[in-house]
Image (cartoon, grey):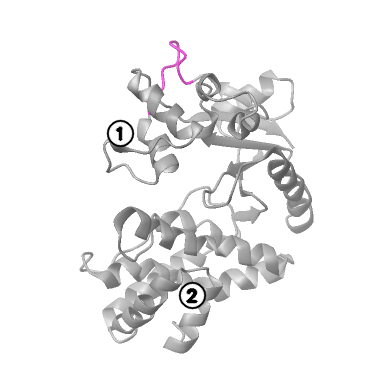
Amino acid sequence: MLPNTDELAEVLLDLAVPHQDIGEAVRLSRHVTRDAESLRILDEAVTELVQDMGRIRGTTVDMPALPDTSTATARFFPLYVFVAALPHIRAHHRERGIPDDVSRHTLADVGRCVAWHRRWHGTGGVLIPQWLTLHFHGELYQLGRLQFQRGRIGRRTGASIAAAGLSHTPGDQGLSVHVPDFMGPLTPQAVERSLALARAFFARHYPEETYSVATCASWLLDPQLKRRLPDDSNIVRFQERFHPVRVPTDPEAPQTPDDMEAVRFVFGTTDVPLDELPRRTVLQRAVLDHLRDGGHWYVGRGWLEL
């Protein structure tokens, strides 16, 4: 199910796996290809991942682990699952007429998750491999600066959309917007281009589905950021595109704080004491000052018309 070592190195390059991790991943792959039990687990994982390819499952798929989860081979095991599933997702992309550059940019998120693992843990591996199961099932695509996930509108968001006078109800089709890091500034121009690409992309390649609304759930939509950042901040201007579903600090509908979500994405770690984190940028200072002043960060939710 896996290519030989020479071919595997080339496949990992195509998936944007950092060069420093390719050698180890190729070497450790022999532990999988020479072990019957590992191959059985790999086969079952790929079968589950590609089942009903292209259907909206609306959720990620758990990645099975090798019996000894403490080994380096176990850390890289999800990578081998995605390599083995690659022919299936590429076939789906060809069937749907997905352009090669969109397919390549989408699947290159594998390399980002490998880079994440080394950034946060200092070792090779794949961080949050469940996230990548959306990419390898035809449910999520990288279109310019943003990622868009085919899905359905939730109950609370649907009620907010309906209250605004649009003919949408919970369960209707909608795109979820995701904002990957490592992709440069979130400029208004980049966001506008991505939204335009999404409108054209899904109309052309999934014509049987109708997407006129996009939703977003992110720490970037916490309205408290507006009080901490300049009015011309890219984050503030991104927020202003969305109709808020609810205010996280609303006393009538309290929401659980998630302070570390902002810290994780801004600083790339949650293991360093807050008073030791850098304060070089406006955003870094905003996140830390808000927590120092006794505040909390939340995941905000919003929607916009496409």
Say few, some or many: other residues with alpha carbon within 10 Å of mark 2 (under 14 / 14 to 19 / 20 or more): many
Q: Position of residue 111 (x, y in %)?
A: 48, 64
Q: Position of residue 231 (x, y in %)?
A: 63, 23
Q: Position of residue 42 (x, y in %)?
A: 37, 73
Residue 47 in the figure: left or right of residue 100: left
Where disc 1 sits, the SS reads: helix
Identify the amino acid type marked 2. Answer: Leu
Identify the amino acid type marked 1. Answer: Leu
Quarter occupied by residue 212: top right
Is 72 covered by the magenta stretch? no
Foreground mark, 2 or 1? 1
Residue at image mark 1:
274
Is 256 covered by the magenta stretch? yes
Q: Residue at x 28, y 41 (%)?
A: 272
Residue 221, visible in the rendered structure: yes
Compare marks 2 and 1 and give the one earlier in the sequence. 2
Quarter occupied by residue 257: top left
Residue 96 in the figure: left or right of residue 70: right
Where disc 2 sits, the SS reads: helix
Q: Please report the bounds of the magenta region as a residue range.
A: 248-257
Does residue 188 sit above or below 113 in this rendering?
above
